[in-house]
Amino acid sequence: MTAIMKFEYTQTFRDQLYDHFHYVARHIGQAAALALLDSFITGFESRIKNYPASAPLCEEAADLGLTTYHDYLDPKLQLRAIYRVSAAKGVVYPLLFLSTKQSIRQALIRYCLRQDTRRP
């Protein structure tokens, strides 16, 4: 497998991360929220860069016909990233950032609908 050279975060992922930061910051403060999310991103990138397919395939995505999406889960932080890998390009595409309490299915449907509205 081609080495992963970079991560290209979708705007949806960034928006969800930003929203989660503000939600968590209200409860634990900005510094602690930043440290928590930085810990998640660092752990995610470290594991996936070295082992791109180590997270299981996302069952909810497969149910919708998206059979190449992986579900990275950090059970300690109760956060997850839904991503896909382009081994040929050496790129990981983190698509969605969610807490474990959020519906993956609903987030995927909203993500797919957003993509359809951006096409010419």
Image: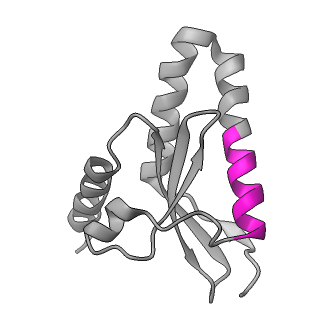
Q: Is residue 119 left or right of residue 57?
A: left
Residue 43 magenta: yes
Quadrant that contains the N terminus: bottom right
Image spot of residue 48 (x, y percent): 69, 63
Which region is colored magenta?
40-51
Q: What x and y, as percent, mark residue 62?
A: 33, 70
Residue 63 in the image: x percent, y percent?
A: 27, 67
Q: Which residue is rendered at x = 73% and y = 75% of the image?
A: 4
Our reading of the magenta stretch's main secondary structure is helix
Label count reads 0
Q: Is residue 29 left or right of residue 18?
A: right
Q: Residue at x 63, y 11 (%)?
A: 29
**Residue 7: quadrant of the picture:** bottom right
Question: From the image, which quarter does the C terminus lie in?
Answer: bottom left
Location of residue 50 with respect to 43 vertically, above or below: below
In the rendered view, tell whether residue 74 sits above or below residue 7. Answer: above
In the rendered structure, the answer to whether residue 68 lies left or right of residue 74 reads left
Question: What's the image's color scheme?
Answer: one colour
Instruction: From the viewer's side, name the closer residue of 88 and 58.
Output: 58
x, y percent for residue 84: 51, 70
10 part of magenta stretch: no
Specify the quadrant of the image occupied by residue 21: top right
**Residue 93, located in which quarter of the rendered image?**
bottom right
| Above or below: residue 41 compared with residue 33 | below
What residue is shown at x 25% (from left), y 52% (from top)? 110
